[in-house]
Image (cartoon, rainbow, N blue to C red):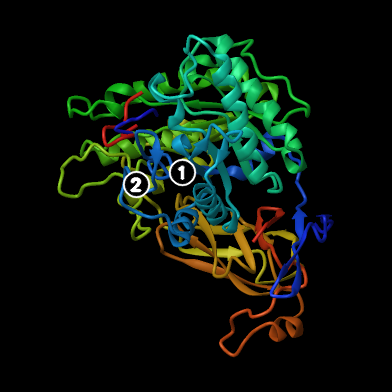
């Protein structure tokens, strides 16, 4: 929301792309373009699971000068993102304000330090095997800044928009399908202006080549409003078929955004109204093969945790059944001294623990358990898992391979969601029973009940044991590169693919969404 106080086969591109002399030594840099796994929209939605927004971090700013702690106090860490993943979130949306980091006098080049930080956080998610969405966020907020779709002269806006996306896309062009670009956030404007901005975005990204020629791109309508889900929505022309998402946001204003405690209850009739709002997404898009990302949803804290959880679980369940990716809006604001604090935050960004585990659990039930939205109830009784039986106890894999493990939970009427995590993501990642081999070594993959009642594990061996031991130091830490990875690349893998990456209200506290 705007200012809401809200693989095996590798292509080597220039195995020695350039040579330079350092201290008399010739140093060669290798760049690799990783395999891009081409999937249908339905397959992408299934793989993306439930999502979470790192809101008010890289999108926070003062007078359009972005700063990671401008609107919230925590510096994002790999440990935070791992915790988010291990709670069951498989998609990470990273809103980004570029603002004064854009050099208008130098072909809209992006400040190197800011771009480096964006890439670091993207890589935190990629390391966990998550899908990551980045965008242009508050540059278009309220028509106050340069990305103004109501400007008297739109030509400079189109030019800058295309130039900025050219520079962003070029930095990430070799990433695989786990990175998704979203053209803009909630930019309000006429259909003609929004349509031309989206076309400019697609053209700019595709022109940068490499994996950007086939990357998934996310296209919003005006304001990312759910009301723009109508027959004949003007999608951009593209050079590749079936590679565009439709992006939309949804908030229930009286309950979810208004900072009073007058309306705190989410009722069954509200669920029906939400279904009607979301049905247009299925009718217009998903049934026609166009996947949808609900990039933001949620409710502010009004001391009504049970109703917030009910809303989020119903939303996630409707999205699951309609083929939509639900991405919760977390604005990073939580004040324990205020009751209520009117914040959206679910996760403590300092500790990685949930402020409201009931709501996180509800999202996972909605997103990963079968059933209709009518079967979702407020304050449900959680039937804890008593046992988890896994289909495999050991796996021997090669880097880049993928295996699936099934889990049988007893009792059969348990509504305790099974989650997955890896003890070493440099060896293997895991999500929803899919294990992906990353690099030589051993890693324990743990399947555990959301309630914490039981768990099971699978030991994964990637590569040959003898080779692995040679690459370990006395303390067991890898000291030499795997033969699968380039010397100057970081090997990261997501579900079923390898990544080689070169070495309108702020929900008051800025985006209170």
Residue 45 in sight from this viewpoint: no
Q: Return the x and y of residue 339 as percentages of the image width and height.
A: 15, 42
Q: Please tell me whether mark 1 sits on a helix, a strand or a loop.
A: strand
From the image, tell me which residue sits under label 1: 52
Quadrant including the N terminus: top left
Q: In this view, does 323 lie to the left or right of 482?
A: left
Give the left or right position of residue 170, taking residue 368 as reference. right
| Nearer the observer, 502 or 323 | 502
Q: What residue do we see at 56% from left, 87% from top?
A: 475
Examine the rendered structure and indicate whether residue 354 appears above or below residue 201: below
- Horizontal side, residue 421 vs residue 379: left or right: right
Q: Is residue 230 visible?
A: yes
Query: In the picture shown, does residue 168 fall above or below 246?
Result: below
How far from the left and from the top, in percent, is residue 41?
A: 68, 33
Badge 1: few (under 14), some or many (20 or more) residues near its Cα, within 10 Å?
many
Q: Mark 2 points at which residue?
A: 346
Circle 2 SS class: loop
């Amino acid at each position: 929301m705007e200012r809401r106080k809200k693989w095996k086969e590798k292509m080597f591109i220039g195995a020695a792309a350039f040579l330079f002399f350092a201290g008399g030594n010739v140093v060669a840099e290798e760049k690799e373009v990783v395999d891009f796994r081409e999937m249908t929209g339905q397959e992408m939605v299934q793989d993306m699971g439930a999502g979470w927004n790192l809101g008010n971090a890289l999108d926070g700013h003062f007078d359009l000068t972005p700063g990671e702690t401008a609107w919230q106090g925590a510096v994002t860490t790999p440990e935070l993102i791992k915790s988010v993943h291990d709670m069951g979130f498989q998609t990470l949306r990273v809103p980004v304000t570029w603002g004064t980091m854009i050099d208008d006098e130098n072909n809209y080049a992006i400040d190197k330090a800011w771009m480096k930080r964006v890439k670091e956080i993207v890589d935190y998610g990629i390391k966990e095997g998550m899908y990551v969405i980045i965008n242009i966020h508050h540059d278009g907020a309220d028509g106050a800044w340069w990305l103004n779709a109501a400007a008297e002269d739109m030509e400079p806006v189109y030019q800058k928009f295309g130039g900025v996306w050219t520079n962003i896309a070029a930095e990430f062009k070799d990433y695989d399908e786990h990175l998704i670009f979203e053209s803009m956030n909630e930019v309000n404007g006429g259909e003609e202006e929004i349509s031309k901005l989206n076309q400019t975005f697609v053209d700019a990204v595709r022109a940068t080549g490499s994996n950007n020629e086939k990357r998934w791109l996310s296209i919003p309508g005006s304001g990312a409003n759910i009301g723009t889900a109508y027959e004949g929505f003007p999608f951009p022309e593209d050079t590749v078929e079936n590679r565009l998402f439709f992006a939309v946001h949804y908030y229930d204003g009286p309950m979810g955004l208004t900072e009073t405690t007058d309306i705190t209850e989410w009722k069954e009739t509200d669920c029906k109204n939400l279904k009607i709002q979301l049905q247009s997404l299925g009718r217009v898009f998903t049934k026609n093969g166009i996947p949808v990302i609900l990039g933001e949803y949620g409710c502010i804290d009004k001391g009504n945790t049970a109703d917030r959880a009910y809303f989020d679980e119903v939303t996630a369940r409707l999205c699951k059944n309609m083929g939509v990716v639900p991405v919760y809006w977390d604005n990073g604001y939580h004040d324990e001294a205020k009751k209520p604090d009117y914040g959206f935050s679910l996760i403590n960004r300092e500790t990685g623990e949930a402020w409201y585990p009931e709501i996180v659990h509800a999202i996972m039930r909605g997103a990963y358990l079968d059933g209709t939205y009518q079967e979702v109830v407020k304050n449900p009784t959680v039937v804890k898992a008593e046992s988890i039986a896994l289909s495999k106890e050991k796996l021997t894999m090669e880097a880049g391979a993928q295996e699936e493990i099934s889990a049988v939970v007893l009792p059969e009427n348990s509504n305790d969601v099974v989650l997955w995590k890896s003890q070493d993501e440099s060896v293997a990642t895991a999500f929803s029973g899919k294990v992906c081999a990353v690099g030589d070594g051993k890693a324990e993959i743990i399947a555990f009940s959301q309630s914490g009642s039981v768990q099971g594990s699978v030991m994964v061996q990637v590569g040959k044991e003898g080779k692995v031991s040679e690459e370990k130091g006395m303390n067991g830490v890898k000291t030499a590169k795997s033969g699968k990875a380039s010397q100057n690349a970081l090997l990261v893998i997501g579900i079923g693919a390898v990544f080689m990456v070169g070495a309108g209200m702020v929900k008051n506290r800025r985006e209170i969404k």
